[in-house]
């Protein structure tokens, strides 16, 4: 309880500091906060948009949370998301004749595989002792984004798009279905299933037990015959796959074609969410909700108050400090 | 000894959550004496010394130095009062020279260092006390015994008068122990006060002027070294007589049997400062204990790891149960009936934040899983653990608490119970009694000798020569990654083993 009061207090402090920043720029912070609130949680449309934004965030958070159980630091959610989107796009624009019931699962698998392979490369390099996964995942983000740029500026550029760097639009059969007349799409089911599996595997299964063992004492785990190398590659593969699914969802349901502006840092925000939540599934949902509201709010501020998009990053950074302060600065 | 004590501790009390580590402890330490603190694990010796060195604050009690009450709030304060401590793990930078390491420790260094004068002082002091340490040698080249002397030199150059040693003989070879005791004698002569913590009875009797025995946080008694005997000390430590429960057998019935384990010409990579194995041949038969003697860091760890399958052979072949197993994974080796009893359960075998039963399941997660891994059969885990604990006559701890909440001794017992639960055919025992008190060590030894009698083969890696001679049917000695001697305890003397261990057979014998 004391922890909650502390958290709320520190959160309020972060909001106050950001209010001060807004004042410096000559904006009215109360108006700004009110606009954020009413635009996100004040209407059913606003809430649905918050949920839409939560889908990729939960998936990229899982991409970080899963490897973090054995102390792998996956900073590569962003790159894995882009490669997932790239693979999914390849499927969507090349197999346009397939019916939806075949095409959708295929691009889902492709998205998972793309992100998974991208993550597994870092896992493999870590196992061989070539590079720390923290460094390699981070660097490969840039490679992934450039790779997507290469395809949309080059071979995959849609000839009918007036020279815009984007792929041909997805056929209808490759668009994830949405629900209730909103933009909430089938990716939400993937995110929920991902969360449930994450919890179930960790707490109930033999593999979860072995993962927790590696997390607690890697030396002892190896001496008990648990192959840490296998888990490193596997968890980077599945984690990357989660981010790949997020990319698949974004490119298919939200954009409908591959664009360089696919992700406003969804992978990095997922990293933040995972560490805010301490890797706990309920915490991931809560943190994803919070950051979804804040990033949506960033768009509002940009549109109605002409505050640059970077402005909201100040608020996100302040929130991160709050989270670290709550734990006394110690990572779990 | 009519002088007043240099240091007086009165009614020191310190509690940790759930434990009263020191309960009104009184202690006097005089200048010019070697004072041994003897006691079981958790008797409160280390706590008391750490209070003295300012690591812990006592709940109550008084420390007087030369009759003046003092408050020691930090190790920095302790050094101001000229109290110094030599830890088990040395705080040294391997890449730097002895002189540089010592210089770093000295208080009030000037902005521009006068390295020459420090080296001169090091040479004077080492000359005086017989240290024979070269100030220009980089620390990584030194043996454990020499590195310990560097620690003592640090304290002496920083003007300490009271020196506390935390289990100083733990990783020393026999002749290095003698060297250390010689240093003790020299320091004593010059009026230094020395306090040392130990479990080892023989050392206490060999060099202590006075002995304080602690039991469950209290002083059980202080006696003069000249008047102490092994049995009187044991009685003070435990309050009752316990017999040495070691079953040694004269004959080796293993002779005719087929080897359980065979290493043929095995080599491994050497990593960092440790030696890799070089052309190691070793056979273990069912029903025998093969003891491995050696100064730590000479390839024993690698030998254990190669047998376990953790370390890969770069050359050579391994056979287990008559099958070639050079390329088996650790999991395959473990599942074929190989147990591993580690020196440091918390570091090498236990998972402190997992529950007791989860720790138990770790011995073979595949066997205890159901539906191909989707869930775990905790019922079976618990009943196996229960049965094993009962067989070994250990207390039953609660199964749902994190293992790390148990005491060190109980963690060790829990790991023993886990490893013995499935009647292993081959046991790799890695310093199994290191750091254990006499009673726990005896029970660990009893487990090994019972398993041997029931037909298990045991690889016993230890630095306690008494233990090796008592338990082993055959002995091998390792030095710099090679097996340099093989014999039976009946045919070789401890001294010979000691010299083989240090690679100085022949030459040092003459000078000794």
Image (cartoon, rainbow, N blue to C red):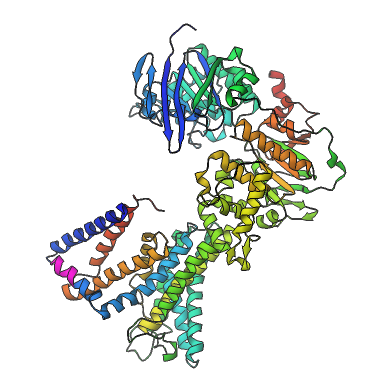
Q: Position of residue B74 (x, y in %)?
A: 37, 30
In the orientation shown, which residue stands out farthest toward the right? B256
> In the figure, is residue A296 to the left or right of B392?
left
Residue A288 picture quarter:
bottom left
Q: Position of residue A292 (x, y in %)?
A: 31, 70
Q: Residue at x 16, y 60 (%)?
A: A20
Q: Quadrant of the N terminus of chain A?
A: bottom left
Q: What segment carries the magenta color?
A: A27-34
> In the figure, is residue A202 to the left or right of A303?
right
* Magenta span: chief secondary structure: helix
Please say if B477 is above or below B363: above
Q: Residue at x 40, y 31 (%)?
A: B56
Q: Can residue A301 be seen in the rendering of this structure?
A: no
Say how many tags the image has.
Answer: 0
Please say if B449 is above or below B263: above
Residue B134 picture quarter:
top right
Q: Can residue A4 be seen in the rendering of this structure?
A: yes
Does B43 lie within the magenta span?
no
In the orientation shown, which residue stands out farthest toward the top? B2
Please say if A241 is above or below A332: below
Q: Position of residue B154 (x, y in %)?
A: 46, 25
Q: Position of residue A244 (x, y in %)?
A: 45, 74
């Amino acid at each position: 309880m004391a922890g909650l009061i502390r958290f709320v207090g520190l959160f309020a402090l972060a909001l106050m500091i950001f209010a001060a920043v807004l004042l410096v720029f000559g904006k009215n912070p109360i108006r700004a906060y009110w606009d954020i609130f009413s635009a996100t949680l004040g209407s059913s449309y606003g809430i649905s948009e918050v949920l839409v934004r939560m889908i990729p965030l939960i998936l990229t958070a899982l991409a970080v949370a899963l490897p973090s159980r054995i102390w792998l630091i996956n900073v590569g959610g962003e790159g894995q998301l882009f490669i997932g989107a790239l693979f999914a796009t390849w499927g969507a624009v090349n197999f346009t004749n397939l019916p939806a019931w075949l095409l959708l699962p295929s691009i889902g698998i492709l998205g998972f595989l793309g992100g998974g392979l991208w993550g597994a490369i870092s896992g493999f390099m870590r196992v061989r002792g070539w590079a720390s996964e923290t460094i390699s995942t981070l660097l490969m983000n840039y490679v992934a984004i450039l790779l997507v740029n290469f395809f949309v500026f080059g071979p995959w550029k849609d000839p009918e798009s007036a020279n815009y760097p984007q792929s041909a639009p997805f056929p209808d059969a490759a668009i994830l279905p949405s629900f209730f007349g909103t933009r909430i799409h089938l990716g939400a089911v993937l995110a929920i299933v991902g969360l449930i599996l994450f919890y179930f595997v960790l707490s109930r299964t033999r593999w979860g037990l072995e993962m927790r063992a590696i997390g607690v004492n890697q030396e002892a785990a190896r001496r008990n015959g648990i192959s840490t190398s296998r888990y490193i590659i596997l968890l980077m593969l599945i984690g990357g796959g989660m981010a790949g699914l997020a990319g698949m969802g974004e490119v298919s349901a939200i954009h409908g074609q591959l664009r360089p502006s696919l992700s406003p840092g969804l992978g990095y925000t997922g990293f933040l969410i995972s560490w805010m939540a301490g890797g706990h599934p309920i915490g991931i949902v809560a943190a994803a909700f919070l950051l979804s509201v804040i990033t949506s709010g960033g768009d509002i501020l940009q549109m109605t108050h002409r505050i640059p998009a970077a402005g909201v990053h100040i608020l996100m950074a302040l929130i991160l400090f709050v989270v670290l302060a709550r734990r006394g600065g110690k990572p779990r | 000894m009519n002088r007043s004590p240099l240091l007086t501790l009165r009614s020191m009390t310190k509690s940790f959550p759930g434990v009263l580590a020191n309960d009104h402890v009184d202690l006097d330490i005089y200048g010019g004496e070697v004072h041994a603190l003897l006691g079981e694990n958790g008797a409160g010796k280390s706590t008391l010394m750490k209070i003295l060195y300012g690591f812990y604050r006592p709940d109550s009690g008084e420390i007087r130095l030369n009759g003046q009450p003092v408050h020691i709030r930090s190790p920095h304060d302790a050094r101001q009062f000229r109290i110094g401590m030599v830890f088990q793990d040395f705080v040294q930078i391997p890449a730097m020279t002895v002189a540089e390491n010592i210089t770093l420790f000295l208080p009030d260094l000037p902005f521009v260092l006068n390295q020459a004068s420090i080296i001169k002082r090091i040479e004077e002091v080492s000359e005086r006390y017989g240290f024979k340490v070269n100030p220009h040698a980089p620390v990584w080249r030194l043996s454990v015994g020499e590195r310990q002397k560097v620690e003592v030199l640090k304290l002496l150059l920083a003007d300490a008068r009271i020196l506390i040693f935390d289990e100083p003989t733990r990783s020393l070879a026999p002749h290095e122990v003698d060297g250390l005791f010689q240093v003790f004698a020299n320091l004593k002569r010059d009026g230094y006060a020395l306090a040392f913590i130990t479990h080892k009875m023989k050392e206490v009797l060999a060099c202590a002027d006075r002995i304080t025995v602690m039991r469950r946080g209290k002083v059980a008694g202080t006696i003069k070294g000249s008047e102490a005997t092994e049995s009187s000390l044991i009685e003070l430590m435990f309050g009752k007589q316990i017999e040495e429960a070691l079953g040694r057998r004269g004959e080796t019935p293993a002779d005719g049997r087929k080897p359980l384990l065979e290493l043929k010409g095995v080599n491994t990579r050497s990593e960092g400062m440790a030696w890799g194995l070089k052309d190691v041949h070793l056979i273990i038969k069912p029903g025998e204990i093969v003891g491995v003697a050696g100064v730590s860091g000479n390839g024993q760890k690698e030998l254990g790891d190669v047998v376990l399958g953790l370390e890969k052979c770069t050359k050579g072949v391994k056979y287990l149960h008559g099958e070639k197993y050079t390329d088996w994974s650790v999991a395959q080796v473990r599942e074929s009936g190989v147990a591993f009893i580690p020196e440091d359960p918390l570091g090498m075998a236990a998972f402190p934040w997992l529950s007791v039963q989860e720790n138990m399941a770790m011995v073979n997660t595949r066997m205890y899983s159901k539906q191909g891994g989707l869930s775990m059969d905790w019922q079976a885990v618990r009943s196996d653990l229960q049965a094993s604990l009962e067989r070994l006559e250990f207390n039953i701890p609660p199964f749902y608490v994190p293992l790390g909440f148990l005491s060190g001794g109980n963690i060790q017992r829990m790991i023993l119970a886990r490893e013995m639960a499935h009647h292993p055919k081959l046991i790799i025992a890695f310093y199994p009694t290191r750091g254990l008190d006499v009673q726990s060590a005896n029970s660990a030894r009893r487990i090994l000798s019972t398993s041997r009698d029931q037909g298990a083969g045991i690889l016993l890696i230890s630095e306690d020569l008494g233990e090796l001679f008592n338990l082993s049917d055959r002995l091998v000695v390792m030095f710099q990654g090679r097996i340099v001697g093989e014999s039976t305890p009946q045919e070789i003397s401890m001294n010979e083993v000691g010299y083989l261990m240090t690679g100085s057979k022949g030459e040092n014998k003459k000078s000794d």
